[in-house]
Image (spheres, grey):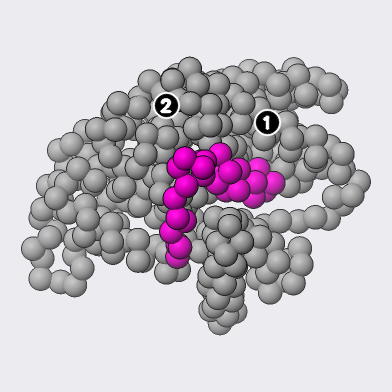
Amino acid sequence: MELIFELAIILLASKLAGDISVKLGQPSVLGKLLIGIVLGPAVLGLVSETKTLEEISQIGVILLMFIAGLETDVNEFKRSGKASALVGVSGIVVPLFVGYIAGILMNMTNIEAMFLGLLLSATSVSISVQALKELNKMQSKEGITILGAAVIDDVLVIIALAFLMSMAGGDVNLSMVIIKKVLFFGGAILVAWKIVPWVLKKFAPLKVTESLISAALIICFLYAYVAEITGVAAIIGAYIAGVAISVTDYKHEIFEKVETIGYSIFVPVFFTSIGVKASFDGITQHIGLIIGLSVLAILTKLVGSAVGARMAKFPWRSSLGIGAAMVSRGEVALIIATIGLETKLINQELFAILVIVVLITTIVTPPMMKYFFNTRSDVREMKPSA
């Protein structure tokens, strides 16, 4: 029953904190992230990080990215391909290079320094997706570019990580890693084109409750699962599943009901659980390093991605908004950090520092996006979110 109590606390606190955040002129997701820190072991200790809560959180981020896919304009997505590539690549190159230099200055070996740069190159736009929704930018050219860049970023970073692991002597077959990625994306596109519409058409007339929504969730979870086992993040698989359904006649019905399911319980748990993971034990001993790496992580991604957006002919303000959306490292960087800890490329002390740095990049992303996207010539009312 403890889980039931924790869910009740999380839902109550996240809704109230989100509302307060909006009233203060910030995206609601910022309040949800911060209240997670308050509820977690770092402050009140009302909510603890458990395996079950983590799994509910994982469903939340998968549904969040699935909803983002459902909202994607495929024609605009195709047109933004070049811009997404420029943003994705430049958003990797700058933090990778600067992170490597920082690692060398920290007396790391070449391999360890390259790993640090690679970790700083990761991006997770799950937080940015919510901010885009609240700023009414999800279906804009900037929003589509951000989502496309995130897919490119994920693939390139994972391949680079496999290459680095092979250099470090790990049991990694680089060719197999690339083949898996190619097979996943090729298969995902083929299934989206031929099978997804057929499955929805067959499920829609079934004489059971919400058969169409069940079919959509089956597709979403299968895409996420296959993406995960082939080395592509589950959130990318979920996003592609959403895009696949977005071109069918069932898009609007599925979107409305999945959004209700996601935002009523799973998505708030995901946002709040990020803060719950925060631990500030021994933070005062490494405050200088934490601040330095946080500034490095924020600026390299912001500048790198913004330069790519500027090369794609976006105005500077929009370019910086795109760069801000790519700043959050989220769960992708945490996964990479865990791999580094297991392979001894980083020690436990640096791992703890990097977890705090990732949390900081996640918290600063929503207000940065609001600042750059809400120009005087383009001020839009922020839509309250669940």
Mark 2 to mark 1 CA distance (whole Å) = 19 Å
Q: x, y percentage for residue 154?
A: 49, 32
Give the quarter of the image for residue 327.
top right
Give the quarter of the image for residue 163.
top right
| Element under disc 1 | helix
Crowd band around label 2 with a 10 angstrom C-alpha radius: few (<14), some (14–19), many (20+): many
Please say whether residue 169 is visible from this viewpoint: no
Give the quarter of the image for residue 42.
bottom right
What type is the residue that disc 2 sits on? Ser
Q: Which residue is mark 1?
A: 299
Name the residue nearer the viewer: 19 or 317. Answer: 317
* Magenta span: 359-386
Q: x, y percentage for residue 61?
A: 47, 53
Identify the residue shown where x is 67% and y is 35%: 298
Identify the residue shown where x is 61% and y is 31%: 302
Disc number placed over residue 47 in the picture, else none: none
